[in-house]
Image (cartoon, coloured by chain):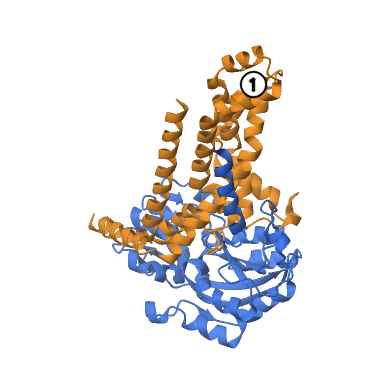
Chain colours: A orange, B blue
Amino acid sequence: MSQLTEAFGIAIRMIFSGDPVVYSIALRTLLIASVATLFASMLFVPLGCLIYFGRFRGRRLAVAFIQTMYSVPTVFVGMLVFLLVSRSGPLGSMGLLFTPWAIILGEIALIAPIITGLTISALQSTGQGLADTAAALGASRGRIILKVLSEARYAVLTSLLMGFGRAVSEVGIAIMVGGNISGYTRTLTTAIALGVGKGETAASIALGLILLSLAMLVSIAVNLMQNRAG
Amino acid sequence: MKTSVWSILSIFILTLTGCGDQQQPEPNSEADTPIEVSEPTGIEPIPRVERLRVATTTSLYDTGLWGYLEPMFEEAHGIELDVLYAGTGRALDWGRRGDVDVITVHSRNREEEFVTDGHGVERVPFAYNYFLIVGPESDPAGISGMSPEEAVVALMETGEVPFVSRGDDSGTHGKEISIWASAGYDYDEDVRTAGEWYVEGGSGMGPTLVMADEMGAYTLSDIGTYIAYQGDLTLVPIVDEGDALLNVYSVIQVTTSKDPELSAALVEFLISDEVQQLIGDYGVEVYGRQLFTPCAGEEL
């Protein structure tokens, strides 16, 4: 027990003394997850709109599939991305493996279903009513979509935050395609995985606490968004 | 609202390409044109600072040896050396796929096969030490003083004292399998199915030692990692004599390396007199004994 409290003490000191290694890892993790969320939002919020407003066969099936993929195992995504970006793979010539970009690519794939699916839900909860009213008032299809989207903006932003939360806390992809290279692709989660193996408890706890505070910030933001949305 | 969030995120992007570069980018790098810098969505496949990748067996990583040598090589050549740790099997696989430039591993047969198959330029031994069977001080299976082959027979016949295997296709795992083979057991048919006492951990050397310690189990470890972790463990060396326990580390330049010159320089670096001396001295001050014996280029 004393070992644990001692480790916590050192961890807290590391955080408040601004330990450069701990903070560079935290910043890198934040950057990678943010960029992944940014790219994913540019691609998959529009896809969510397309699926919601699109009238096509198998739409329900598509939505069910997307929701299933919410819980895709990160190591599985990691393996697919590894095979894709390895030099023997189809994207091998780009030299992405073991760089932050490979992690970003994997995280985009990981959170794509969450952002697409939650965007669809966000639009659904805004209600068909709004679209009908706008249509009755003679709005064009483009205007209707924009209107519904702007009405659902907080809920859509919530989907981005949920995606960010999943990206920032995953470990399978980062370790498989990033390689946990010190000073380059080491993230909070891969550093914790290595630290635990090496018995570096205090540093691992410090990194874990930082990760938890990030998760808490995201959760607070989600709550605020949902209040606004409601 | 959304625009402002996105603009904040796009500022992050600008800084991301530099996020791993602890060194300053070279001032007169031609690639560093303003156009590229102001292009926030352009994925930059080749980072500005040249990077060389070495895949290493976990024991050379967990002991801190690579962390110690890495900055020296980086400074001498003005590059970033990316050190990736994995079991020998995985490191060789990365080499075969062309994902790394150099590998440092310890499994002679597989290294020779790697070179014969045309994936590696040459197998160059650079250091050695020994394996140990470590276990609880009480030695519940009574294997102290035995040869490694006798010891595994005794473990099998006792059949209840746990043994944690790396189980990860690493060099150490390969060594363990060869000991079982010389003791007359078929690994897949006799050993893996032997019972609950035989535990396949599936982790690196460090975590495996921690696991064995928690379980009061025996395990096979290279001496370097054992010594480096000894402070946190109650495990003691039980079997430490026998020809089978020799552990030779080699460096191999991968034939498909993007920078053969630099890769060759890394091989030369490891067997240079200066670095050989450093390898021999590594850890002596901290642990009071040598972790690795240098053996530049010599076959043992």
- Residue carrying label 1: A61
Q: Secondary structure at mark 1?
A: helix
In the image, is B269 to the left or to the right of B194? right
Compared to residue B213, the image places residue B10 above or below, namely above
Residue A70, x across and y down, in percent:
55, 33
| Viewer-nearest residue: B91 or B169 | B91
Compared to residue A57, the image places residue A47 above or below, namely below
Q: Say which residue appears at 68% left-offset and 60% top-offset.
A: B37
Residue A148, x across and y down, in percent:
60, 24
Q: Callout 1: few (<14), some (14-19), or many (20+) C-alpha neighbours within 10 Å?
A: few
| Viewer-nearest residue: B213 or B108 | B213
Q: Residue furthest left?
A: A2
Quadrant location of the C terminus of chain B in the rendered image: bottom right
Residue B63, x across and y down, in percent:
46, 70
Q: Say which residue appears at 65% left-offset and 76% top-offset.
A: B266
In the image, is A115 to the left or to the right of A11? right
Name which quarter of the figure residue B240 lies in.
bottom left
Compared to residue A44, the image places residue B256 above or below, namely below
Q: Dot 1 falls on which chain?
A: A
Q: Say which residue appears at 53% left-offset and 64% top-offset.
A: A183
Q: Amino acid at mark 1?
A: Leu
| Viewer-nearest residue: B207 or B74 | B74
Q: Residue furthest bottom?
A: B273
Q: Is residue B165 visible?
A: no
Quadrant location of the N terminus of chain B in the rendered image: top right
Residue B264, x across and y down, in percent:
70, 76
Name which quarter of the figure residue A56 lies in.
top right
